[in-house]
Image: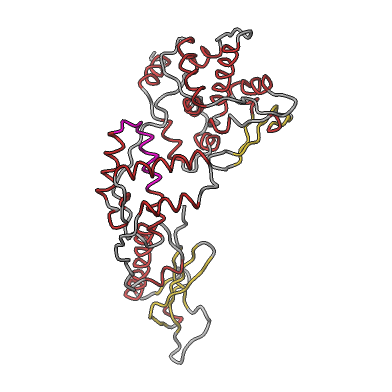
Amino acid sequence: MYGITKIDLRFNRKNQLDTHNKAPIEIRMYLDGQTSYKGTGISITPEGWSKLKNRPKDYQINQECERQILELKSFEKEFRQKHGRFTIKDFKLLHKPEAVPEPTNVSFTKYFAEQLEAEKEGHKVVLANKKLTLKYLKELRPEIAFCEIDFQMIRDFDFFLKAKKLHINTIKRHHINVRAYIKLATKSRLISFNPYEDFKIPRADAYSSFCTEAELRQLENLTFNVENRKERFMERCRDMFLFSAYTGLRYSDTAKVQANHFQQTKDGLILDYQANKTRKFGVKYLSMLFGGKPERLALKYMQKDGSVLFKNMKQQQVNVTLKVLAERAGITKKLRFKDSRNTFAVVLLDKKIPINIVQSEMQHSNLATTQIYTKHTPEQTIQAFKKTDWT
């Protein structure tokens, strides 16, 4: 998130009067540790300046200074909206005609492929998803020139993805991939306008499915025949899901938790980790979450050799098994591993944990993302009414 420039007035900054006993009024601009000054073209005597109010005493002079400040603020706002960035040096472009690049027929699809090649050492899953996005773009149109990047093209791409009957959040992910490279091309002056500024990317509710506390207990109460290999795998799937529901970890993080990631402290077992998706570091106080249930699961699977707790657990296999586990537990929902993280956020908010704490636990950069989990489902509304004492 970019800071907004602080703008105010300065009089006689150099502490030097001219031959008419006057000094200039300047506009000071401060942004991200950098300061710049712009002349107003107005000079006054020291008697005409109010030190208390930090502005000229003369009404008309003060109005002109305010007009110039407002002009700078409006320029910054419009520049940010158009380019997605702003530095203090950009104020120099005020009143200068902006060089708008001529539409070019260079292929956007080729540019997309070049960016993927540059990112080939990145996260494999993310890269594979972006390659699929490029594949879909080429199915829509074999070649898409920069000059063809407009609202209609984005809309056609949206219709194309929906015609494939993809999940709404999968469609959202492909739009985000395209938008990222269009934004990058815009900053490189290859495209003059980002059509996603006018297009609303579709999305489903963040927690379209989650487990209630009662459903978590139903899963917890399941028993397994440990002599049977398939049953042992089902138990491990159940416990992996529960561990994520108790900690809010994504699948990519839960699948990589190792014994040496834990520390024994006076407050119990804690988990130090780095999120695979966001690269943010985090700490989970396992003994304090869900009555210490994640701590007990960690100890259950912790090996002395420091190996991964839930090793050889492929997400697709886990999701298939979760549907079987849900049916066995008497849960009517078709569970997916993602529902565990949704469960964590919903339960914490239902327990009146402050939303800023939940935001931190979920590693959300934006509070608005966490607030999505505060929406009430019909099931939650019914339960809330049942708990209410109307007497």
Residue under the point 51% across and 27% down: 315
Q: How is the image coloured?
A: secondary structure
At which x and y percent is residue 3? 47, 57
Q: Quadrant of the C terminus?
A: top left
Is residue 173 depicted above or below 219 in this figure? below
Query: Relative to 340, is 195 on the left or the right?
Result: left
**Percent coordinates x, y for residue 183 in the rendering:** 39, 54
Residue pictured at 43% horizontal, 35% vertical: 371
Q: Is residue 287 left or right of residue 317?
A: right
Q: Is the residue 136 above or below the residue 95 in the image?
A: above
Q: Where's residue 27, x and y in %?
A: 43, 72
Looking at the picture, does residue 134 appear above or below residue 44?
Answer: above
Question: Tag count in the figure?
Answer: 0
Q: Is residue 284 magenta?
A: no
Residue with the most extreme bottom position = 19
User: Camera-side residue: 177 or 64?
Assistant: 177
The one nearer the camera, 287 or 300, is 300
Please state which of residues 347 and 297 is positioned toward the viewer in this rendering: 297
Q: Main secondary structure of the magenta part?
A: helix
Residue 294 % position (x, y): 62, 23
Looking at this rendering, what residue extends furthest in the front direction?
142
- Residue drawn at x 34%, y 33% as measured from the top left: 168
Above or below 118: residue 12? below
Tell me which residue sits at (43%, 83%) in the image. 45
Please report the bounds of the magenta region as a residue range. 164-178
